[in-house]
Image (cartoon, grey):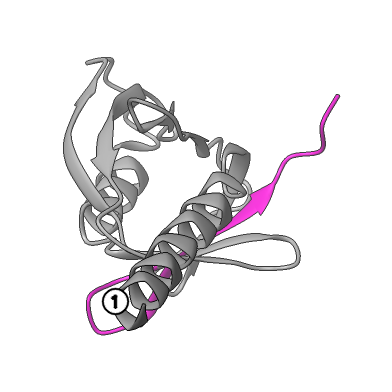
Amino acid sequence: MRIKTILFALIAISITSCKEMKKISGDYEVTIVGNKDYSQHDITLKIEMGEENRISGKSACNQYSGNFTNPKDNQVDIGMLMGTKMYCKDTSQIERDYLDHLSQVTYVNKTKTGLDLLDKEGKVIIVAIKKEDK
C-alpha cells in the first residue's frame, strides 16, 4: 500500500510540473538580455509545449527555431537552433548576444508579466514579457 501511495504521489507531481510548464507556452517579447535593455529591438520568443517542444522567434534580424527538452520541473535543455542568414549590420552584435544567452538557459520561471530565463547558476539572463492574446 505504501508503494502505491508513493507511486501515486510521484505521478501527481510529474503531471503538475508538466501542467506548469505548459502554462509557459505562448508568444513573448524579449526585453532584457544579460544586463542590457533590448526592449527597443525586435526580439521575440515563442514556446510551444507538446509532443515536440519547440522554441522559435526573431533574434533582432533573423528568424530562429529549434527543439528543447523538459527533463524535470522548470528545467529546459535547448537543442541546436537553426536560423536564417540575413546580415543586418546594425543589429548583428545584439543578435549574437541574445543567441549566446539563449544557449545558456537551463531554467524557466513564470512571472506575473512573462518569463525569466535562468542559467545553470540560477541567475536571470533573459527577461521576456508575454504578448497580449489578440
Above or below: residue 6 compared with residue 65: below
The residue depicted at 26 percent of the width and 15 percent of the height is: 84
Q: Which image quarter is the N terminus in?
A: bottom left
In this orientation, which residue lies closer to the viewer: 21 or 85? 21
- Up/down of 19 relative to 133, above or below: below
Q: Disc 1 designates what residue?
A: 3
Q: Is residue 33 above or below residue 65?
A: below
State yes or no: residue 119 in magenta: yes
- Extreme right residue here? 134
Figure quadrant of residue 72: bottom left
- Looking at the picture, how far across and down is residue 90, in whole percent? 39, 35
Which range is magenta?
A: 118-134
Amino acid type at image mark 1: Ile
Q: Position of residue 83 (x, y in %)?
A: 25, 21
Element on which disc 1 rests: helix
Residue 38 at x, y percent in the picture: 53, 54
Question: What quarter of the picture does the C terminus occupy?
Answer: top right
Instruction: Pick the residue in front: 43 or 132.
Output: 132
Dividing the picture into quarters, in which one does residue 57 lie? top left
